Amino acid sequence: MIGGNHLCGPFLSASNAIQDFSHNVYQASLLGEAIDMYTEYEKKIQRAIENNNDEDYIISLQKESDYYEQIFRFSLASVLPADEA
């Protein structure tokens, strides 16, 4: 038993299932956070355009939105199997 995980015996499959489940929950949390941030910046951009804000402000929001979109794509690629990414 290393780090609380069984290496053999009757609890091996349960240990692996718990490990996989916790990994999936964590990945789902990260994906949810990335989607929320991306959506928030898209709404900010839309409001800035509707309110005729400064062009530099809108460009900076778009850059931040692109940044969060890349984080989302990276998070999504890390979750998908290699042949689907």
Image: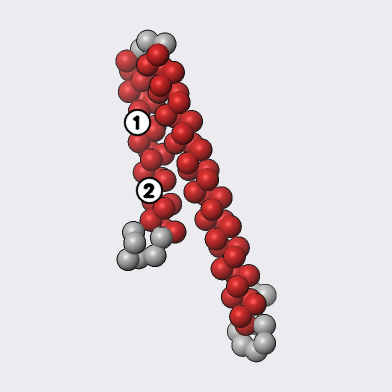
Residue 83 image position (x, y, % from top left): 32, 66
Q: Residue drawn 36% across and 25% down?
A: 60
Q: Residue drawn 36% across and 20% down?
A: 58
Please name the colour scheme applied to the rendered image. Answer: secondary structure
Type of the residue with mark 2: Arg
Name the foreground residue: 16 vs 84: 84
Q: Is residue 84 left or right of residue 7?
A: left
Q: Determine crowd level at label 1: few under 14, some 14-19, many 20+ residues with C-alpha closer than 10 A.
A: few
Q: Answer yes or no: is residue 65 visible.
A: yes
User: Given the current orientation, which residue lies at the most extreme bottom position?
Assistant: 9
Residue 3 image position (x, y, % from top left): 64, 74
Q: Answer yes or no: is residue 2 visible.
A: no
Q: CA distance from mark 2 to mark 1?
A: 15 Å
Residue 29 image position (x, y, % from top left): 56, 50
Q: Residue drawn 65% across and 89% down?
A: 9
- Based on the displayed image, in which of its 4 quarters is residue 65 positioned? top left
Image disc number at residue 63: 1
SS assignment at label 1: helix
Image disc number at residue 13: none
The quadrant of the picture occupied by the N terminus is bottom right
First in residue order: circle 2 vs circle 1: 1
Residue at image mark 2: 73
Name the foreground residue: 85 vs 30: 85
Q: Residue drawn 34% across and 59% down?
A: 85
